[in-house]
Amino acid sequence: MFLAAILLVPTLSVHATERDGMTEEKAIEIADNMFENIDASQKILKTSDGGYLIGKATVTSVDDYDEIITTYDSAMDPNSMSVEEAKQDVVNSLVHPEDSSIQPRLASPPTQRWVLALGAEYKSSAFSGSGWRFSGYMFALNLVVDIICFGQVMEMMEE
């Protein structure tokens, strides 16, 4: 019964790109792949860490989920850009990186919790070095959606 609930809960989409020996052709391919399933009419918001948000997200403290740090809505934010502009931004950041320093391989506990609305996506900026770089974010699905989906599964199981 619990397995069925897990299978019906929508998934989050989070991507990361590593920057190493980047050519413009490779950067264009990465940008195209990053946004390949995004409708051209959608707006994309570049976040302060260089990542890209499509949709709505609420950022809370990891220590207190009721402490809302900020909210984002790429469709309404005046700083949002088109899909083509976002692709060009990715290409520019990969081919001409502002920070070419190698980032150390480390993991630190998350300091923020990003709650993505149903259908929202977050795509990280590129990073240097090998292995993993941990963003300091924790991602979650909107809890209301979890409860509704779980409730629907329970109703189907009881019938």
Image (cartoon, helix red, strand yellow):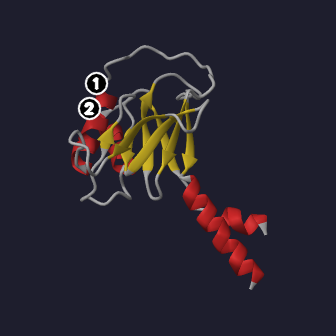
Q: Is residue 10 above or below residue 35?
A: below
Q: Is residue 9 above or below residue 24?
A: below
Is 133 placed left or right of 94 in the picture? right
Quarter of the rendering occupied by the C terminus? bottom right
Number of numbered labels in the structure image: 2
Residue nearest the observer in this picture, 90 or 157: 157
Residue nearest the observer in this picture, 39 or 119: 119
Q: At label 2, which amino acid type do we have?
A: Asn
As helix, strand or loop, the secondary structure at mark 2 comes to helix
Which of the 4 quarters of the picture holds residue 151? bottom right
- Distance CA(mark 1)–CA(mark 2): 6 Å
Residue nearest the observer in this picture, 77 or 95: 77
Residue shown at 26%/32% (left/top)? Answer: 92
Mark 2 packing: few (<14 Cα in 10 Å), some, or many (20+)? some
Is 37 placed left or right of 159 in the picture? left
Is 128 placed left or right of 138 in the picture? left
Residue nearest the observer in this picture, 129 or 8: 8
Of all residues, the one furthest to the front in this rendering is 66
Q: Position of residue 60 (x, y in %)?
A: 51, 36
Residue pointed to by mark 1: 96
Question: Is there any visible trace of residue 14 in the rendered image?
Answer: yes
Of all residues, the one furthest to the bottom in this rendering is 159
Which of the 4 quarters of the picture holds residue 113? top right
As helix, strand or loop, the secondary structure at mark 1 comes to loop
Image mark for residue 92? 2
